[in-house]
Image: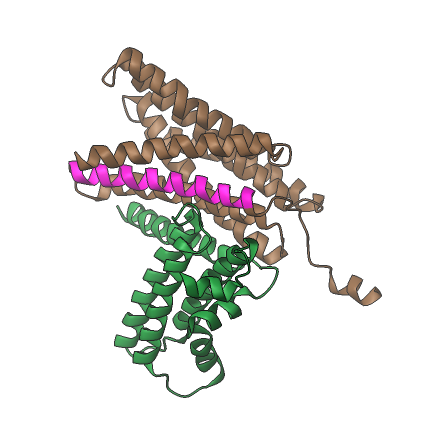
Chain colours: A green, B brown
Amino acid sequence: MVMATLILILSIALCLFYIQTVCQKILARRFSEEYFRSIANANRLEFPFVRKAVEEFDGPVDYAWIRMALKCDYLALTYLLKNAANAKHRYARSEMLLIAYFHALFCTMGLLHLLKVPERPAIVKLTEILQHFADVVGERVSSVRFGDLSASDYLLSL
Amino acid sequence: MLDQLLTYCLQYGGYLLQLLLLTVFTARGHWRRNIGVFLYLVVFVSVDSAIRPYTLHHYGFQSRQYLHVYWFTDVVLTILAFALVCEFFRRACAGNDKIWQTLRPMLGFVFLLLAAISYFMIASNKDVYWHFIFQFQRNTYFTCLVLTTLLYIMMQRAEVRDEELGMLVCGMGILFAAPTAGLAGKGLLPDSAYMKILINHISQLCMLGMLSTWWYAVAKFPNAATVRDIPATVQGLE
């Protein structure tokens, strides 16, 4: 009974660990250039500022602003992932996994805030996911030519 | 109704992914580098998409033939999975023969120990055959999960930068964790139909998770090679 309980808990924990590791390995993918900057500028995304604010300043963070900014950026980027230079108009498997990971981390961030535990690591991971999404969108857009339109012009036309 | 639909979606999604993965391995020539994974996939696809459906179609779900084929193929797949973990250990030790020479007899000993423990655990039981299969599988899955985790830790410590192998190991970890939890949970959780369906769906999802992870590993790291960090002494010489 005790042994079975231990095995059950351990195997569930290891399953979650491996899923998280896969997510981290997907996020560790290096792109040929920093596509996310042009995407963030064109769409006025705030996650680079959120990351900077969290990493560079030790003071208390404006949780309400961060939560809202991350949520809005997430909605914008998932829309772009589905529709920007994506002929299939659907997410790839790795993107679906990262979307689920984003939701899990977003809930964790809320929980940590409720428990008054520092939520910085969760916020940094959330911005990493958004940066990866922006890089993927940027890479896709840059790989397709839209006549005379630049990547930013194309995104504004969506 | 919804349960049936979900089961079919996961089942046929699995078949499709298995065939796609095999096609990619064959067409791109990845099978040479990942011969262990390729062989495991070939047996997995043969069992899952051909042997079991054929037996089910000819003899029916309640038949003894299907029961025998199902459990026998399950044991074969479990043993192959153990062999694949050993192959991953060998690949992680590439360029470091001393460690592999030490690990090889240890892995063999672990397998023999597994079989012996499984046998002694059921020695007092009348229906030895079925109990042996159940115990052996339960122990093997858990051992493989532990070995996979040890391999992952070893790769982190040795700073093996084979990204493809890292993803393949993670996929194996996901595959082993679900059946281990399912088999452990069988005795603990209430024996209801919903619980059985839930465990079945989680196992299918984890199988899809493993195949997707392997797909990603093959698709995103096409020219993966084992690279280790140059030791400090060598760096100093340069």
Determine the main secondary structure of the stretch shown in magenta: helix
Residue A10 or B192: which is nearer the viewer? B192
Residue A140 or B124: which is nearer the viewer? A140
**Quarter residue A127 falls in:** bottom left
- Residue that appears at 36% across and 75% down: A119
- Residue that appears at 16% across and 36% down: B193
- Residue that appears at 67% across and 40% down: B101
User: Residue B37: percent from the left, percent from the top?
Assistant: 54, 34
Rendered position, A149 above or below B183: below
Q: Is residue A81 magenta?
A: no
Quarter containing the N terminus of chain B: top left
Question: Which residues, given as a range, are shown in magenta?
Answer: B193-219
Looking at this rendering, what residue extends furthest in the front direction? Answer: A148
Quarter containing the C terminus of chain B: bottom right
- Residue that appears at 45% across and 45% down: B173
Looking at this rendering, what residue extends furthest in the bottom direction? Answer: A59
Q: Is residue B25 left or right of residue A60?
A: right
User: Residue B134: percent from the left, percent from the top?
Assistant: 33, 30
How many numbered circles does the render carry?
0
User: Residue B182: percent from the left, percent from the top?
Assistant: 30, 41
User: Residue B87: percent from the left, percent from the top?
Assistant: 58, 37
Q: Is residue B206 magenta?
A: yes
Is residue A132 at least partly visible in the picture?
Answer: yes
Rendered position, A54 above or below B197: below
